[in-house]
Image: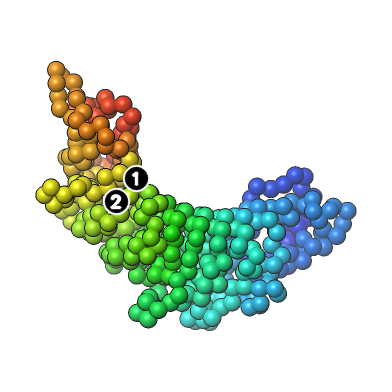
């Protein structure tokens, strides 16, 4: 309580306004103590309307291992959040924490966020690994003005029934342009089947890194492609970022072939089957078929293995920016191709540095204006 009082006094006495505030508490009661202290401090000579808390527009709130709150939004602590918040990050206690007797209790846990709060947000981050889908229904249904939505699944492992996947009412996210799914444990353990985002522009899919685990979950592209199709966002969808994923080249290739509107693709620590490379999904097509991603402008291949086949990278570049040598100089034969940028970085290694940027192909392509090629060194490890 002493810490809550000190923080409340500090916020009341601050001149000007804060851009952002991050608060972390063990549970709702501790946060309520802070709110009570803030109310008491504001009763002094400092005007309630002038204190730093009231005009705050960006807030991060994290809870530890306790969760006991009213199910009535009008009686909840969230009613007393700053009234002008437009960016809100909320991290809830894990279902594996002491907040729940057993993890399945999280399915029935109340999450009484006021509808008015959710409706005024333009950016919302929700960290939660609770069972079921009630926590999503209680929040996302009212996120009608959210443009950037981040769902941190905190390593969620949950098996949804076929009925849940096919019969659950969909949650429409009418203004979401950027959707980030973070810390996914395995592909089918996330309730993506609930969501529709018709205005989606950027889609980030980040799996939870677990280098010590012997169990590998290979991604199937169907759940993600179904989400894109169901959202009917092909006209707006432009950017895909995939991180810490295991996926076969055939699955990756099939996924990319079905989203030709992409202009930006980032593959960060993406592992494919032995003897293959992720770049194959971008250059292997049927005879006389269109290459994947005809509108691609930027490709990022990050944290590659040091033995990543450089010849395939060069093949990709030549397929996108073909040229002929005339009088010792490149003459580019497809000026209409939109490709502009390739960024490549490698993992640390005991081997020598990469020499890809010294190849003849790269030297020639760099002579075409408007193209940026970047090859991060492989770092020497003693």
Residue farthest toward the right in the current orientation of the protein: 45
Rendering quarter of residue 336: top left
Image coordinates of residue 185 in percent, x first then y, are: 38, 66
Say which element carries label 1. Answer: loop
**In this view of the protein, can residue 356 be seen by the observer?**
no
Image quarter in which the C terminus is found: top left
Q: Residue at x 44, y 66 (%)?
A: 195
Q: Residue at x 39, y 70 (%)?
A: 193
Mark linked to residue 205: none
Is residue 88 or residue 211 the one in the foreground? 88
Image coordinates of residue 120 in percent, x first then y, are: 62, 59
Image coordinates of residue 217 in percent, x first then y, are: 29, 66
Say which element carries label 2. Answer: loop
Residues at marks 2 and 1, CA–CA distance in whole angstroms = 8 Å
* Above or below 194: residue 107: below
Rendering quarter of residue 369: top left
For disc 1, the marked residue is 263
For disc 2, the marked residue is 260
């Amino acid at each position: 309580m002493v810490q809550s009082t000190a923080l409340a006094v500090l916020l009341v006495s601050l001149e000007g306004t804060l851009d952002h505030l991050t608060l972390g508490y063990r549970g709702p009661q501790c946060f309520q103590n802070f709110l009570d202290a803030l109310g008491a401090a504001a009763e002094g000579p400092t005007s309630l309307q002038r204190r730093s808390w009231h005009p705050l527009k960006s807030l991060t709130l994290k809870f530890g291992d306790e969760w006991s709150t009213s199910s009535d939004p009008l009686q909840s602590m969230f009613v007393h959040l700053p009234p002008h918040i437009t960016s809100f990050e909320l991290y809830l206690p894990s279902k594996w924490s002491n907040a729940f007797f057993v993890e399945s209790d999280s399915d029935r846990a109340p999450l009484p966020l006021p509808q008015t709060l959710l409706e005024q947000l333009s950016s919302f981050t929700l960290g939660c690994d609770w069972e079921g889908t009630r926590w999503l229904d209680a929040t996302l249904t009212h996120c009608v003005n959210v443009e950037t939505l981040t769902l941190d699944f905190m390593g969620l492992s949950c098996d949804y029934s076929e009925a849940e996947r096919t019969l659950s009412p969909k949650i429409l996210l009418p203004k979401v342009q950027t959707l980030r799914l973070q810390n996914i444990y395995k592909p089918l353990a996330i309730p993506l089947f609930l969501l529709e985002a018709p205005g989606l522009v950027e889609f980030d899919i980040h799996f939870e890194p677990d280098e010590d685990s012997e169990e590998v979950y290979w991604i199937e592209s169907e759940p993600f492609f179904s989400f894109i199709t169901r959202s009917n966002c092909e006209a707006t969808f432009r950017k895909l970022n995939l991180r810490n994923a295991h996926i076969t080249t055939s699955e990756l290739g099939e996924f990319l072939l079905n989203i030709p509107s992409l202009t930006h693709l980032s593959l960060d620590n993406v592992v494919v089957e032995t003897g293959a490379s992720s770049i194959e999904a971008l250059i292997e097509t049927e005879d006389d078929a269109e290459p994947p991603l005809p509108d691609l402008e930027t490709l990022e291949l990050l944290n590659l293995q040091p033995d990543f086949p450089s010849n395939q990278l060069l093949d990709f570049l030549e397929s996108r920016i073909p040229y002929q040598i005339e009088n010792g100089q490149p003459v580019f034969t497809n000026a209409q191709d939109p490709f502009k940028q390739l960024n490549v970085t490698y993992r640390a290694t005991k081997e020598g540095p990469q020499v890809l940027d010294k190849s003849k192909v790269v030297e020639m392509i760099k002579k075409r204006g408007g193209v940026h090629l970047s090859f991060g060194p492989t770092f020497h490890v003693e």
